[in-house]
Image (cartoon, grey):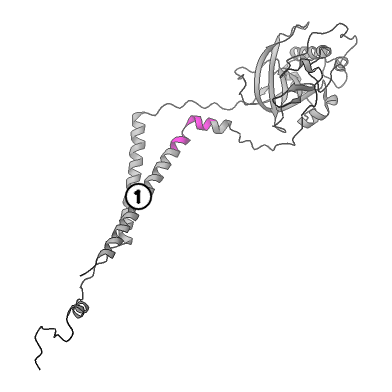
Amino acid sequence: MLDFRSSSAAAAEAARQRTRTVLMLLLCCGVVIIAAQLLRSTALLQWMEAGGWDDRPAGMSIDNRLDAIENKEDALPIVVAPGAKRAGDEQEGAEAGDDYFPGVKPAYLEQVRDDTIFRSEESSAWFNLLSVLRNSSQKELDAAVVLRPTYAQLFRQADQYRGKLVQVKGVMRRAHYVKAPANDVGIEGYYVTWLFPYDNPHSPMVLYVLELPQGFPTGMTIAEEVEAAGFFFKRLAYAAQDRARTAPAVLARSVVWHERPVLASAEPPSAATWLLVVGGALAVSVGFVAIVVLRTRRTAPTVVADKVDFSALEKLVQPSGTPSDGKTDKR
């Protein structure tokens, strides 16, 4: 009896191999189509544009923790301005020095203390700087900037930069409008913003802005690249989530907004577009399948013997001593 099971098993294995190859090709086609649709997605492009892929080098980390805050009973998550001025805060003859922008009164700055929340004694200096900002054009302020300190310089050399016009750059993460306390210079309110500078993106500074560019977003979850020319005020204490910390406080008239291009909302594809995409994918898949089938047939042909030799089989089934012609040997 002949056993042809070995050749049948080989054929079955070849068929399974072809099936696996075809399925893999179909899977690859599906992955390519899905990837193409994702790349066309406006939401994905916006995420990539606004993502955290910032190749700017991060500066040294500054430890801004504060062991104790002066006037702890008045501590708030963030204090928006000094309180009302006390009698005697005004000082005659407090005129601008040579290193200060015109209108800044250095004598008022002597009442400012670092590593504290806002104090009522600082009200005169606070509103003096805001008044100078409001009464000056943005061009005048930008042209007068000569100091471009790093976050570390502002943090560690607050006395040297206090009341000076400085330039800061970074990503604004929060911005909300607050009304100003009662004052005699006509300041009605300003925006309290959190700026994370490029050179120290893990430690914020507080940027107070009189006005924001038209269309600038506000809220607690924004991420906009800006730069500003403003007056450094103090190293301000605030209550963070974990403990008391300090941050440089800067007052500015406005900011230069490096607005990211807004991607147009993608319209849903039409029926013709979907038919074209599906038809193209099917055509590509069928082409791949045809190529695989043809290559498989060519590389693994079925081997069939032209002639089968049964002589060895006859020796096995014929009794010993029996002639091959079937006649009995008579002796």
**In the shown orientation, is residue 16 left or right of residue 168?**
left
**In the shown orientation, is residue 157 left or right of residue 186?**
right
Residue 162 seen from this side: yes
Residue 289 is inside the magenta segment:
no
Q: Where is residue 112 in the image (x, y as percent from the top left)?
A: 84, 18
Tell me the quadrant of the picture where the C terminus can be found.
Answer: bottom left
Tell me the quadrant of the picture where the N terminus can be found.
Answer: bottom left
Residue 305 against residue 98 in the figure, above or below: below
Residue at the spot 79% in from the left edge and 8% down from the top edge: 84
Which amino acid type is marked by label 1? Answer: Val
Q: In which quarter of the image is residue 126?
A: top right
Residue at the spot 36% in from the left edge and 48% down from the top edge: 23
Nearer the observer, 220 or 311:
311
Residue 71 against residue 24 in the figure, above or below: above
Q: In which quarter of the image is residue 311?
A: bottom left
Decide: few, some or many residues near mark 1? Use Cα within 10 Å; few <14, some 14-19, many ≥20: many
Residue 324 against residue 284 in the figure, above or below: below
Residue 38 is inside the magenta segment:
yes
Residue 150 seen from this side: no
Nearer the observer, 275 or 220:
220
Q: Provide the residue designation for mark 1.
A: 22
Nearer the observer, 3 or 291:
3
| Helix, strand or loop for the magenta stretch, by majority | helix
Element under disc 1: helix
Magenta stretch bounds: 36-46
Q: Position of residue 70 (x, y in %)?
A: 82, 19
Q: In which quarter of the image is residue 55?
A: top right
Q: Where is residue 244 in the image (x, y as percent from the top left)?
A: 75, 24
**In the shown orientation, is residue 308 left or right of residue 262?**
left
Residue at the spot 71% in from the left edge and 27% down from the top edge: 242
